[in-house]
Image (cartoon, grey):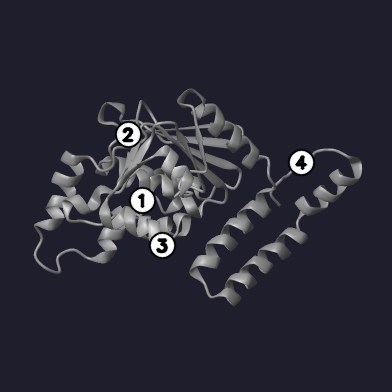
Amino acid sequence: MSDFQTIRYRREGDVGTLTLARPAKRNAQNPLMWWELTRLGAELLPDDTLRCLVVTGDGPAFSAGIDLVEGMAGLLASWAERPAGGLTVDEGMAAAGVFSWIPSLGCASVAAVRGHAYGAGLQLALACDFRIFAEGTKVGLPETRFGLLPDMGATVRLPRIVGESRARELILLGDTIDAAEALRIGLANRVVPGDDLDADAAELAGRLAAQPPLAVRGARRAIDAAWHCAPEDAFRLALEAQIRCLQSEDFKEGLRALTEGRTPRWQGR
């Protein structure tokens, strides 16, 4: 795996762990981190042996959001100085879409969030399938305080997770909420003691990694399609995924394991 300066990636068996690695900056995201995240995504997307990705932060915070110096006062400020029409949507997507590869992985993902996750930090967690929060964690989307809006996926993903009404509150008001409230509204899947966060994330990742890969991949895509496609098209996509499962070696292995009273050995084919 490539060497990085602002992130780390390690692989243990079927599970990969992505760690934001700017602890002195509370893992604030700068252009270099976005570039390295994009590079990592390009390396992981074709890897069909990865069974789960855990996303976490080094130090006491998951991510403080965009680096105020290199991001807000640097790249974004330079964009703001361009004449009208000088910044295209495609150019903006290159930065705004740095997390988009996570939902496109062939495996599920888990965000292990401690301390705080603000702005782009929370949007990174929203890109994952599951979010485990340490007790006392605070999260929010404060972009409106700067005259901006969250454009790294929150406007698409947050309403799906917590419902449109709560998403409007969090996005339009820029409110900060704690882990208990995040659990209550469905933003967090679990809230655990801080000392247990890594172990609980690893336990969930291990359970996900042990699931049949083709079924997990097909189910995730079918769930996403239910939000983005017409009902009939989403239903068809789910059935297509089911047919691939029925005709797979994994399904045959599942039947054999059931007959023989043992745990299936999934191969992802």
- For residue 138, side relative to residue 133 (left or right): left
Q: Which class describes the residues within 10 Å of circle 2: few (<14), some (14-19), or many (20+)?
A: many
Q: Tell which circle, 2 or 1, labels the residue nearer the N-terminal end.
A: 2
The x and y percentages for residue 228 are: 49, 68
Q: Which x, y percent locates residue 204?
A: 59, 37
Check disc 3: other Cα within 10 Å, few if <14, some if 14-19, many if 20+: few
Q: Nearer the viewer, residue 32 or 139?
A: 139
In the image, 12: left or right of 135?
A: right
Is the Cβ of the residue at disc 2 closer than 8 Å to that at disc 1?
Answer: no
Give the mark, 4 or 1, whose residue is nearer the N terminus: 1
Is residue 135 at all visible to an observer of this figure? yes
Q: Residue at x 12, y 52 (%)?
A: 78
Q: Earlier in the sequence, mark 4 or mark 2?
A: 2
Q: Which residue is mark 2?
A: 6
Label 3 is placed on what type of residue? Glu
> Alpha-carbon distance for marks 4 and 1?
34 Å
Q: Number of labelled discs?
A: 4
The residue identified by callout 4 is 265
Q: Secondary structure at mark 3?
A: helix
193 vs 47: above or below: above
Position of 243 with respect to 9 (left or right) is right
Q: Tell us which disc is closer to us: 3 or 2.
A: 3
Decide which of 141, 100 is in the foreground and name it: 141
Residue under label 1: 98
Amino acid type at image mark 1: Val
Q: Which label's residue is closer to the chain start, 4 or 3?
A: 3
Spatial distance from mark 2 to mark 1, Cα to Cα? 14 Å
Position above or below: 242 against 64: below
- Mark 4 lies on a secondary structure that is loop
Q: Quadrant of residue 74?
A: top left
Residue of label 3: 164
